[in-house]
Amino acid sequence: MYERSRELFEQSRQLIPGGVNSPVRAFGAVGGVPVFIREGRGARVVDVDGREYVDYVGSWGPLILGHAHPEVLAAVSDAASRGLSFGAPTELELRMAQLLTRSLPSLEQVRLVSSGTEAVMSALRLARGFTGRSVIVKFEGCYHGHSDFLLVKAGSGALTFGNPTSAGVPAELTVHTLVLDYNDPQQVDDAFRRYGDDIAAVVLEPVAGNMNFVRPSAEFIQGLRAACTKHGALLIFDEVMTGFRVGPQGAQGIFGVRPDLTTLGKVIGGGMPVGAFGGRREIMEKLAPMGPVYQAGTLSGNPVAVSAGLATLERVLQPGFFDRLGETTAALVAGLCRAASEAGVAFSGASLGGMFGVFFRAQPPRSFAEVMQCDREAFRRFFHGMLERGIYFAPSAYEAGFVSSAHGEPELAATFAAARESFALARGP
Ligand code: KE4
């Protein structure tokens, strides 16, 4: 099993650090050989050894219609046939801006970039430029891309500024980043009481998908909105993962909280490199060439990538799409919980739209600390049990899972059959 993947992995490790172009793909959190994927079709991918898997990673979120959707491929081929990139404005970018601002009321203007990291980095520079302030507040367990000043862990004491989590990030670059606990309204109040007039922005994942799956409490997320408004700080929803994944208006539409800026990625590119950030016009007009905040990109708004995003979003925004997707995802989580219960394994799950989390603990976690209590060894055994049975979950206990509109009854049935055996393995010796 995995022979060809093993061969390719050994060769790749000679030329690519860790053999991968993004760390989580190396299976470091679960061990074993990362499967090299040859192709994808709908809800399934096939590895280089010819083994097929039901895919719950979906390229970490973008493939909400499933792999190689014929209408998305047709749109990409059509755009590519007229040239790949021009470095000049195109009508496709206008159509994307129209679709995004029509879908998200908080977006009066939007700018396209090529990744989620770029979207968040740009949005935070814009927030600092607009407010003239320096302090950024983020939350432990949330990931917003790999900009230097966001690779930060909480400071030594409460309300102390962050320390770098990565080598190569000078401490000076994180001195303006304050890291608080997610879902802790008291810490938010304390931080604003102490630093309120210096805070440029608060950035958060409105559903935290980078510490598996943690929903915000109403008190927490509404309190953030009120505190930012009171102190003149900007509230930034990083919806790179949740945007057009949990609902047609992202998490902001579900929670009824209007951020000042929103960042997007993943689904809006449909599997091609597209990110975006947008919000109130008076803020966005501070951006070059209108205003003093510089931001740029050679392939920003690339017409071929945008055509994949448009073809995806046009289908995602069809009436009933999220009703069906949400039902499939909820059925997946319920079936997994049933299988775990029958196997006597402490397990829970949660979902919103096409995004879900599974936890080897009795209740879904509400905080980073509770996520850390999940049984990682049980997850590792479960992950490999499922992989060997043709079910591909995210290779980390700290990542959310994703369902596409191509997932249906056959995929759920195959998943539950594999889960019944894999939970027995998860129980351990
Ligand atoms: P990218 O630069 O990877 O396109 O986006 C960064 C980013 C920003 N904000 C949120 C909420 C995100 O989830 C991400 C990227 N997510 C990870 C998976 N959890 C991407 C997978 C990877 O790093 O390989």
Image (spheres, rainbow, N blue to C red):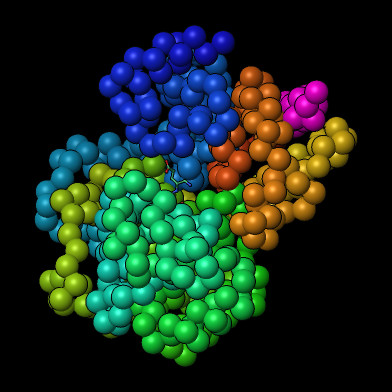
Q: Residue at x 11, y 56 (%)?
A: 88
Is residue 242 one of those drawn in magenta? Answer: no
| Relative height, residue 86 to residue 221 (above, below) | above
Name the quadrant of the N terminus: top right
Residue 109: x, y in percent?
30, 73
Q: Nearer the viewer, residue 281 or 116?
A: 116
| Relative height, residue 203 to residue 168 (above, below) | below
Residue 29: x, y in percent?
55, 34
Q: Residue at x 70, y 48 (%)?
A: 373
Residue that extends furthest to the bottom in the rendered view of this protein? 230
Q: Nearer the viewer, residue 231 or 177?
A: 177
64 horizontally vs 301: left or right: right
Residue 163: x, y in percent?
41, 59
Is residue 421 one of those drawn in magenta? Answer: yes
The boundaries of the magenta stretch are 415-429
Please identify the quarter of the rendering in which residue 340 is found: top right
Classified by dominant secondary structure, the portion drawn in magenta counts as helix
Name the quadrant of the C terminus: top right
